[in-house]
Image (tube, rainbow, N blue to C red):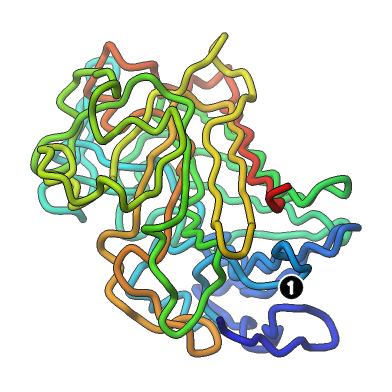
Amino acid sequence: MINTVSTESNLSGLNKEDFQKDINNKKTDLFILKNAQGMEVAVTNYGCAILSIMVPDKNGKYANVILGHDSIDHVVNSPEPFLNTTIGRYGNRIAKGKFTLYGEEHNLTINNGPNSLHGGPTGFHARVWDAVQPDPTTVVFNYTSADGEEGFPGNLEVEMTYRLEDETNALVIEYRATTDKATVVNLTNHGFFNLAGIANPTPTVLDHIITINADHYTPIDEVSIPTGEILKVEGTPMDFRTPHTIGERIDDKFQQLVNGAGYDHCYVLNKTESGELSLAATYTEPESGRTMEVYTTENGVQLYTGNWLGGFAGAHGATFPARSAVCFEAQCFPDTPNKPHFPSAVLLPDDEYQQVTIYKFGVQE
């Protein structure tokens, strides 16, 4: 585990001056959130990237449980450009970087094989957001995405709030967006979590235990685009309705795991009604006893097991090898604009996009 050196202002050992820079005539900075329980989260307004999440283990020892960087230059130049950032306009993949909306075809930037991924190379993850911190537990980000940016129609006004609850160690992410033209919107946060804490090297998550509240998932083809089917997880290595370690079946010769080089699939969450805030997944690291619960209003959650992490360096000398993190990306289904039978991702001028996702940390009883 990396021994972060606390500064006067934070547990994570991050320095404000290392995150202050002018990028495209906008200033980046470091924001530290703290709650009454002692939890601390550090973020920057470049991509709204989360830099550290400091929470205790069963013995009260704090560690950073998200793969992060320790300077703005490292965030901007990260080998994993989506590391813990806000993703938009469209999280996940759109096939061949094109879709038709009300008879008009829109062509997006291709940045993942033949497809558009996570809003393109200069999506929301690569933008400097306006930011204000009204109190110690909260930071509010705003960004205006111009009509035609990365090929998406409409001027999109986005507001996003990161907030720590005082009663529990929970990070709440609230999203809102409005448009002046019909468009598609699918926002998410691409947090790379490891409840053991980052280290050199950060251990894999293969012996960590997860559950996902989903009876179905969206299978993918060889370039990770949904086939359009919605299949049962029952009887397959995709079934996390009961607790399993991540590594128990990840290398099975099951075609979906071959296609994704491990888990990289959208789970169709069990919902009593669409838009309800409900438990999507749980995550436990047995040695530290740390736990995380994921709640969301979204219909889906993408499980990604860091299959393509390459061992690059992060904060305070930590390194991030393959499968050293797990992501739970709350979102619409991938390629929804090209799959009319999937729940719609269309946003119209008179409507407001809303999403709430909560990452709640604890320890095993």
Tell me the kind of residue under disc 1. Lys
Q: Quadrant of residue 323?
A: bottom left
Tell me which residue sits at (58%, 51%) in the image: 143
Considering depth in this image, is 333 or 210 the residue closer to the camera?
210
Tell me which residue sits at (69%, 85%) in the image: 13
Residue 148, horizontal then vertical, whole percent: 35, 43
Does residue 28 lie above or below 271 as drawn?
Answer: below
Does residue 58 lie above or below 342 as drawn?
Answer: below
Does residue 36 lie above or below 115 as drawn?
Answer: below
Q: Quadrant of residue 22?
A: bottom right
Residue 262 appears left or right of 304: left
Residue 223 appears left or right of 297: left
Tell me which residue sits at (56%, 71%) in the image: 197
Q: Which residue is mark 1?
A: 61
How many numbered marks does the figure carry?
1
Considering depth in this image, is 21 or 246 the residue closer to the camera?
246
Residue 13 appears left or right of 107: right
At label 1, counting other C-alpha atoms closer than 10 Å, the crowd grade (few under 14, some 14-19, many 20 or more) is few
Tell me which residue sits at (58%, 34%) in the image: 177
Say what secondary structure mark 1 lies in.
Answer: loop
Residue 45, horizontal then vertical, whole percent: 61, 65
Does residue 267 lie above or below 10 as drawn?
Answer: above
User: Which quadrant holds the N terminus?
Assistant: bottom right
Residue 263, horizontal then vertical, whole percent: 28, 46
Residue 73, horizontal then vertical, whole percent: 48, 84
